[in-house]
Image (tube, rainbow, N blue to C red):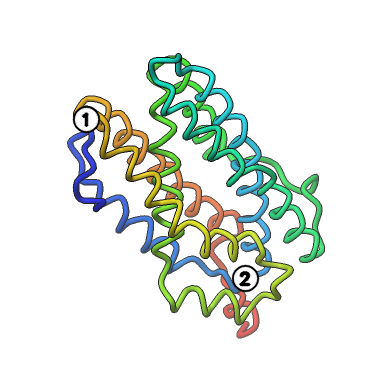
Amino acid sequence: MIDSLKTNFLVSIPEIVHRTMDTLENFPWENPTLYSQWLAQTFFIVQHTPRYICLAAARFDYSQNDFHRTLVAHLSDEDLHEEDVLNDLKNLGHVISEFSPMPEVKIMTENLYYQIDNINPLCIFGRILFLEYVASNISENLRKRISSTWDLNQRQFLKIHFEEDVEHVKKAFSVVHGLTDEQQRLVGDQFYLSGLFYTDLMSAIELSNNGVSHQDKRSA
């Protein structure tokens, strides 16, 4: 399914998927400092999601009403997920004011606003497809690592996306399959860029703690 996604870049979509999945598998989710930082940076991203959806939906005129209605329906799937992140963070003993958006988050969020306003609102489907495809393909091993480390009230955001995004990704692909070759490439471009920005962010989060894992700290 993902192999059929096109892009204007001389890159492989499966390549960025593999890079992202590998980055997630190797991230030290058991480290409370890094997990808290990940939640905070995730909040700084997902707080924009309802705004992206509304902005892109408003850019489609009546001749593109199917896209408009798809995004309007998708808003209910994504609205207030940022509150789940804040609650997870609170249950880890933190508040969002302790954190600031990393440069990688600024790049990731501002890029999509630019794409929607200046390239084509269809680009939003590349971001949606990337995030939901990745969430729906998390390995069972990683799911177990996270669930065995954190209480349910500390991982509610991840639980929701692990369970709901399997169905969401099917809806996103159904939209892509109906696009022209040129439109598909715009979606593919944003899919790839989202993966590029996201893996850079994950690396930056690890570096923010000098890459020292919770296990390393206990062994020191």
Q: Which residue is painted at 59% across and 41% down in the image?
A: 45
**Residue 182 figure quarter:** top left
Q: Which residue is mark 2?
A: 31
**Residue 8 figure quarter:** top left
Q: Picture coordinates of residue 137 (x, y %)? A: 39, 63
Q: Picture coordinates of residue 57 (x, y %)? A: 51, 24
32, 77: nearer the viewer? 77
Q: Residues within 10 Å of mark 2 (few under 14, many from 20)?
A: some
Q: Earlier in the sequence, mark 2 or mark 1?
A: 1
Q: CA distance from mark 2 to mark 1?
A: 38 Å
Q: Picture coordinates of residue 102 (x, y %)? A: 60, 41
Q: Residues within 10 Å of mark 1 (few under 14, many from 20)?
A: few
Give, as a three-letter code, the residue at label 1.
Asn
Looking at this view, name the residue that lies furthest to the bottom.
219
Give, as a three-letter code, the residue at label 2.
Asn
125 in relation to 200, above or below: above
Left or right relative to 179: residue 25: right
113 in relation to 76, above or below: above
Q: Which residue is painted at 44% across and 22% down in the image?
A: 65
Q: Picture coordinates of residue 22 (x, y %)? A: 36, 63
Q: Which residue is mark 1?
A: 8
Q: Quadrant of the C terminus?
A: bottom right
Q: Secondary structure at mark 1?
A: loop
